[in-house]
Image: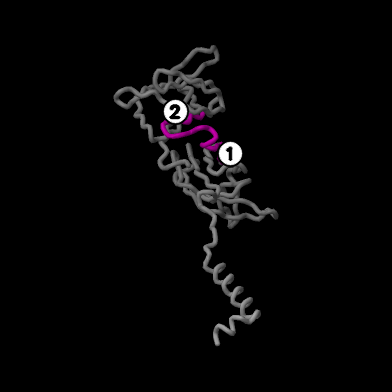
Amino acid sequence: MFHQLLRSPFLKITALLLGLVTFAASKPVPSEKKGNKPQLRIVCVSSLSANQEVILASRDDKGKWQELGTVVLRTSLITDWLPAPIGELHLAVREQGALKSICQFTYPADSRRALAVLIADAEKNTYTATVIDPKKLGFVKGSVLIFNFSSHTGLVSLGPKEEKVEARQNLVAKPTLEDSGMYRMMVSYLDADGKSVSCYDRQASGNADSQDLLFLLPEKTLGLRVISLPVFGSLE
């Protein structure tokens, strides 16, 4: 009897449709990989105050604030990866119940990972941000990313080789390690007469699996202030 029913054209079509529905329901739906979503790490070189809470935010088409998360800024801070949409972003503080932007920058449309490097502007009570894509710069393990935020031409040695870093520019360099795994880090700058003025000299530890950030900052007495920050975790 059952075989006779299956010979019916109507029942054959019904069985076929039920099979297709069952197959579609059991087939896993592809999900977007987290690694493909744009992400941001904030590097706070100098902060306006100790442990300053700010809100990472964007604006919609109507100008309404969209809060993305909260970050507590302090000097020499590198955050974990934060989800961040492409386009205009802000760091804001809450004043009288409303958000006020104290830093504006743009997440590049063609980047999957980005660093926003913050420098505090005490006079304006704001931050300036420099956004870079580590992959595009070739900032890989075993290298040092040098930022020159001063108005001087910087001279940086990571071992015997000297690198020239122009004012307001950045550069990726690789240290030349000694047998001990250390290298001599020296920083100087060119004064108005083009003479080299030394301002930093120390032994640094090298690691082929690490990445470091080196900042040349303006300083009235020495001409340059040098800050070195190691990057923990992958930038990929």
Q: Position of residue 114 (x, y in %)?
A: 53, 41
* Residue drawn at 58 percent across, 39 percent down: 124
Amino acid type of the residue tagged 1 in the rendering: Lys
Residue 39 counted in the magenta span: no
Q: Is residue 154 left or right of 61 when viewed as pictured?
A: left
- Which range of residues does the magenta coloring cover? 126-147
Name the residue that disc number 1 marks: 124
Q: Position of residue 177 (x, y in %)?
A: 36, 24
Location of residue 25 (image quadrant): bottom right
For residue 222, above or below residue 47: above
**Residue 141 in view, yes or no:** yes
Q: Is residue 215 left or right of 167 when viewed as pictured?
A: left
C-alpha span from label 2 to label 1: 23 Å
48 or 132, nearer to the observer: 132
Name the residue that disc number 2 marks: 226
The way the protein has been coloured in the rendering is: one colour
